[in-house]
Image: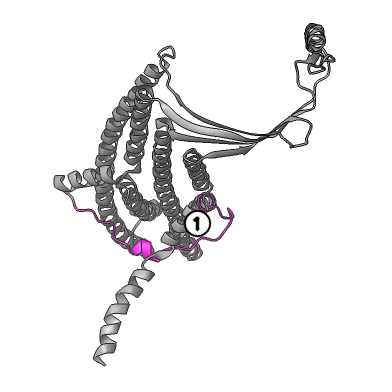
Amino acid sequence: MINKILLLFIILPVIARAQSSGALDRYVEEGLKNNLALKQESLELKKSLEAIRQAKALFYPHLTFNPTYSYAAGGRRLNFPVGDLLNPAYRTLNELTGTSQFPTNIENVNELLAPANFHDTKISLQYSIYNPEVKYNYLIQKSLLSAQEAKRAVVENELRYGIETAYYQYLQTLEVVKILDNSGAVLNELVKLNKKLVSNNTATKDVVFSAEYELSKLQQQRVEAENNTRVAAAYFNFLINRDLSGAIEVDSVTLDRDAVVTEGSEVLGSLKQTAIGNRSELKQLNLSMDAARYAVTMQQKAAAIPSFYFGGNAGFQGFGYSFRNQAYMIGQVGLQWDIFKGYERKSKIQQAKIQTELLQTKKSEVEKQIELQTTQAYYDFATAREAQRVSSDALTNASQYFRVIDSRYKNGNVLMIEYIKAQNDVQTARLQQVIAKYDVLVKKSVLDKTIAE
């Protein structure tokens, strides 16, 4: 029995946390999975990953099969009268020696300079032993990949805020419609009451006309409110890449969640430090600076130390595809060192240093911007909380005043205009309370986005 009780104490908090996630958290996850802008960033990330693979491929040997065949017709020829020069001399030598040891039928050379029916079928191997540009290009691409991941995190943070804000705006429009419906019910009762008063000859028809006019104005407001609801729902569904007319679940867990942030200068300072530590914009700049530093090192090492490589060719070469007595093999070892290239290397080093300094300046600016954003978001949230408290008090006062006016009107002690004013004050107070309520949630979402939590 005791073990079962202990098990309940362990399981219940887990269940509570699972249930507390609410519909909004599920919608945020759906948006992060399906949003088109985030999918574009994911594709950019995959493209950067392929750039790393391409840079890594330079570390491996390069083996190619490269057959060529040449056929020439016409063009320049090589004419050399070797037969005319050697045949008489060899003929004389044969006469002097009494032999036929020396050939006397040598033909003159008359060959095309461009080879005809000539093939070179070979396999080539190239491998870089030492090349700083290969190594540091790989490190640069790795830094750029991490920077792209940080950029995706920035888009994700913005998207999360956008989904939450759009959801709060949708829920706000729903509550506005409910408030207008409640006001409409009050005005309908007023119309019925005024008609009874007129039928009992205790009031004139103008009170009926006045009440019906107020009801028609309210109905027009409700039409506009319903349109705002449809637009807010469409925008929310757009962010999570769903059908624009899809149904949206009301998240009661989120609505019941109390958004509280401790006040004080120490708290604000802590939030600033948290934002600077968490914001992916700064991570992106740091990684971009790493890439710029690698670029400086790459150019410096390439200017100071030559690159070494080896390679070779093996295959067949000759006239006609006979492959007999045509085999050959060539091995090569070499280095490459740009001794002078019009100060291009020096300019590239300076360019990379300028890029590093530019990113460092940008980082300082972004840090100041983040501190400013955190300060503004913190005080905006505190102001929204205070406005919510004031709006609640205002609604309480307006409701109590309306109850008094309603009772006096039914007893014929208050004019119609005072009743309408009191009813409008209650409606306005309720609308202000709804605005303040969701403004707190939006401002809390802004604060969370600013500190990247």
Question: Which picture quadrant has residue 275?
Answer: top left
Whole-percent x, y for residue 72 in the image: 80, 21
State which quarter of the image contains the N terminus.
bottom left
Whole-percent x, y for residue 420 in the image: 40, 53
Q: Residue furthest bottom?
A: 1
Question: Which picture quadrant has residue 299?
Answer: top left
Q: Give the residue at x 54% y 47%.
A: 36
**In the depicted structure, whether residue 71 falls above or below residue 192:** above
**In the depicted structure, whether residue 220 falls above or below residue 191:** above
Verify whether residue 159 appears in magenta: no
Q: Which residue range is magenta in the image?
A: 238-262
Q: Residue furthest right?
A: 105
Verify whether residue 255 appears in magenta: yes
Q: Using residue 67 as the reference point, say whether residue 233 is left or right of it.
A: left
**Residue 80 seen in the figure:** no
284 and 62: which is toward the camera: 62
Residue that label 1 marks: 208
Whole-percent x, y for residue 168 in the image: 41, 54
Q: Using residue 439 as the reference point, say whether residue 382 is left or right of it.
A: left
What is the magenta segment's predominant secondary structure? loop
State the count of labels.
1
Q: Secondary structure at mark 1?
A: helix
Q: Give the residue at x 50% y 56%.
A: 208
Given the image, on which type of amino acid does mark 1 rest? Val
42 and 206: which is toward the camera: 42
Colour logic: one colour
Whole-percent x, y for residue 323 in the image: 74, 37
313 and 261: which is toward the camera: 313
